[in-house]
Amino acid sequence: MRTPGACSASVASLVLLWLLGLPWTWSTAAALGVYVGGGGWRFLRIVCKTARRDLFGLSVLIRVRLELRRHQRARHTIPQIFQAVARQQPEHLALVDAGSGACWTFAQLDAYSNAVANLFRQLGFVPGDVVAIFLEGRPEFVGLWLGLAKAGMEAALLNINLRREPLTFCLGTSGAKALVFGEELAVAVAEVSGQLGKSLVKFCSGDSRPEGLLPDTQLLDPLLKETSTAPLAQPPGKGMDDRLFYIYTSGTTGLPKAAIVVHSRYYRIAAFGHHSYRMQ
């Protein structure tokens, strides 16, 4: 007998024995015997085998929900949570770039993101403004969106495979007031220069000035070196339910679409990974 059939038979037995006036304990024991004898033992065997994993998963779920509720009540944000960790372990590794071998500590990432926040505030950007990031994966990528979040701004993370129409579409729909792109993607930006609005402020991140760089593009790295790395004196009034950044798809089934990631969603993803893998 299959498990659903065994379950039905056990329930029917339980009801019948109860109608006959037998105590609940006897009725329950008899129904359990019918269930096990009818093939339910297979399901119980699986339950016993996976109980430890399932209980651990349940404990992680409860823990993350409680932590998130605490942060929501305190109106914490991802930058604030990061800064608290950075103060506790400033010299611990935060980012490792497997390609270049670059390693950033929490203190370095905190300082870089502080410089990003201060720079964009000084340039007149305000909380709620969107800044597009068109950059290959490296430590600066994290520092940029984290720094923008510290200043209350929202990053639009563009897929580096986007070119021409999909690229201009993403920049237009995001409402970005600025674009930060890597020197390795300068040619892709130059290809759509005619479709970009004149009001779009452009920054190039990299060690050198690449060929074909648009004349109205500013080099980001020299500006950051001259900017204070101190935390903002007046952090923005944001909470866990506010937008952190947008992630754009590659557009394989049409034009790219943006997924909105709020602070709480990012925290859940990070916290589940942290607790599930027992990371220290």
Image: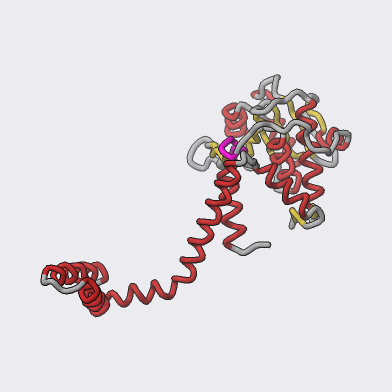
In x, y percent, where is residue 31?
22, 74
Q: In the depicted view, which residue is nearer to us: 67 or 251?
A: 67
Q: Is residue 25 left or right of residue 207?
A: left
Is residue 158 at least partly visible in the picture?
A: no
Query: Which is nearer the eye, 40 or 219?
Result: 40
- Residue 194 higher or lower than 156, as above or below: above
Residue in the picture at 24% in, 67% down: 4
The number of callouts visible is 0
Confirm whether residue 42 shows in the render: yes
User: Where does the magenta region start and end?
Assistant: 240-246
Question: Of all residues shown, which one is farthest toward the right?
Answer: 226
- Residue at (81, 37) in percent of width and height: 115
- For residue 173, what is the image quadrant? top right
Vertical comparison of 66 with 218: above or below? below
Colouring scheme, one of rainbow, by chain, secondary structure, one colour: secondary structure
Q: Nearer the viewer, residue 180 or 194?
A: 180
Question: Considering the image in quadrants, where does the C terminus appear?
Answer: bottom right
Q: Position of residue 259 (x, y in %)?
A: 54, 39
Image coordinates for residue 103, horizontal then vertical, percent:
80, 55
What quarter of the picture does the N terminus occupy? bottom left
Question: Would you identify the image quadrant in which residue 216 lies?
Answer: top right
Residue 251 vs residue 161: left or right? left
Image point 69% across, 42% down: which residue?
Answer: 79
How far from the left and from the top, in percent, is residue 264?
57, 43
List the single residue furthest toward the top: 198
Residue depicted at 71% across the width and 45% down the height: 142
